Amino acid sequence: MKTRPSLQQFAGIVGCAVILLCGFRPASAFSLVSLGLTNHFTTLTGPITNPTNGHTYYLLAATDRSTAVENAAALGGHLATINDAAENAWVLSTFGSYADSMWIGLNDQQTENTFVWANGERNSYRNWERGEPNNGAGYYPNEDGVSMVNFRYAHPGTWYDSPEEQLKPGVVEVDSTLRSAATPKPTTARPNLPRPATGTSSDAQSALSVSSVNANCFTHSDFSSLNGLSLAGPATGVDNFVRLTPTTTDQLGALWRAQKVYCAGGFTTEFRFRMSAPGATHSFYEPGGDGLSFSFQNESAHSLGTEYGATNNSLGVSFNTFHNYGLEPNGNFVGVVKVISNITPWLVQQPLNTIKLNDGDDHTAQIQFDGTNLTVLVDGTLVIDRFPVPARLALDVDGYSWVGFGARTGVSWQNHEILSWTFCGTTPPGGNAGIDPAPTTTLITDGDKYVRAALQSDGRLRLSLAAVANTTYVVQASTNLVDWVDIRLATTDSNGRYEIVEDIDVTTPQRFYRIVPQ
């Protein structure tokens, strides 16, 4: 194919939701685990049965081809074999809306220009695009995988040979009659929360812990004040938010925490963002570019930012809205990318289906880093689950980084805006990080309900409940995870929300809150 080059600390939960106000060191009753499962992978959709052959199909999250092959085998199947035009049309209509191109089973890994199917099946059906296969046509030295393209191309459903290192969703085919009962189940887009280890106290399973201060945490409920922040490029404060770029071409803007924070041990961060007013210089280009990023980096507090992160020594989570053909799955995806001297190799890319990043609405992102793996949620939906990352490049010798946001426009543009931001890192060896003391919260969802906690400036605790609409819950408090006291009833409104403000003693080392059905 011709292409254009270009959290720390989750509490185990069963039942009600849990919030950890950062800085809290949990009692021994807690067993802390990371979000995710061992030996897992993510599916975009499936299982779906093809009524013609009775086989089961999945669409895996975007990976390189070799990883897609491994994940297909773990499901008891293989990258899909296409036997005729009818099957090709079914695969396109079933999965074509998820990505611009998808791995199928055809390949010429063993012998150049001798294409075979991954499962060894022999058939003569081919649906190559005109001029394909071309083994890179000078752009790449080898293209040994084969992908099917979708409706964005002139000839949907046609095939291209593609470099195996490109990240694409993989179409998996499983002959259900051969599938082993021991085949692992893939992680769906919204998995259950991790369960506590054996012996975890049931009282701890639904507790909200509140600690008064942690020096490696900060919060910006809005940006009416820019104290402690560093803006770069065109980034500017507008009312109570920060606009990273305006709606003009070729802009690079950034917002960084002015002081480094300790990141080597892990962190959690949550922020609200908005991308709006998309446009482009020509109708040939899709409007709305290029996206924004959260990153930790070891370049500068004044580094310009892009949709990938800082411009050097950066590890970023990209919320991407512009499609670079051949390098990216579409123009609406989340990915992880490392940046070294403006070279930006993607580590993982995940298309979004039900969430439109630049629809002008407010969106909430949550990112957890456990020192090795990154987990990303958008609007409560798990997008990237415990993906291992090379964090060392973004840290100084003591494990500190600048953290913040970048955005860029090019031939396409939009407003990139950060509306609020909380961040909390682990305490570094030998003491605190020298960051302005300010409590913050990490939100952990449980099904359709959650509790959000925030300490007010007057020392009171604000609890925001989101759960089933028009339903009454009991809000309980405890100081020891054993004795629980009902503090009030909370009945959600028609939108499933209820908010209370509770007087607390902020000198108390820790407090616990939970919600239970009435």
Image: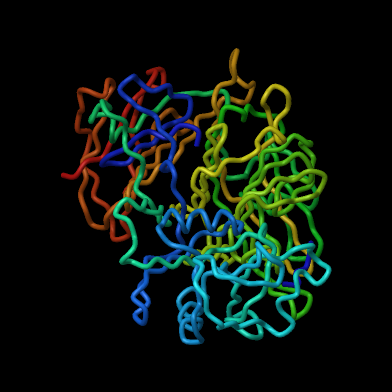
Q: Position of residue 182 (x, y in %)?
A: 32, 50
Extreme-left residue of the structure: 518
Res 486 quadrant in image: top left
Extreme-top residue of the structure: 430
Q: Is residue 4 above or below residue 272?
A: below
Q: Residue at x 51, y 44 (%)?
A: 375
Q: Residue at x 68, y 35 (%)?
A: 227
Q: Is residue 460 above or below residue 444?
A: above
Q: Position of residue 344 (x, y in %)?
A: 74, 51
- Give the quadrant of the N terminus: bottom right
Q: In the displayed structure, does residue 513 sit left or right of residue 76?
A: left
Q: In the displayed structure, does residue 483 sit left or right of residue 128?
A: left
Res 173 quadrant in image: bottom left
Closest to the observer, 186 or 319 = 186
Closest to the observer, 173 or 260 = 173
Q: Residue at x 77, y 69 (%)?
A: 136
Q: Residue at x 49, y 70 (%)?
A: 80
Q: Is residue 186 above or below residue 143?
A: above
Residue 74 visible in the picture: yes
Res 263 quadrant in image: top right
Q: Position of residue 198 (x, y in %)?
A: 27, 29
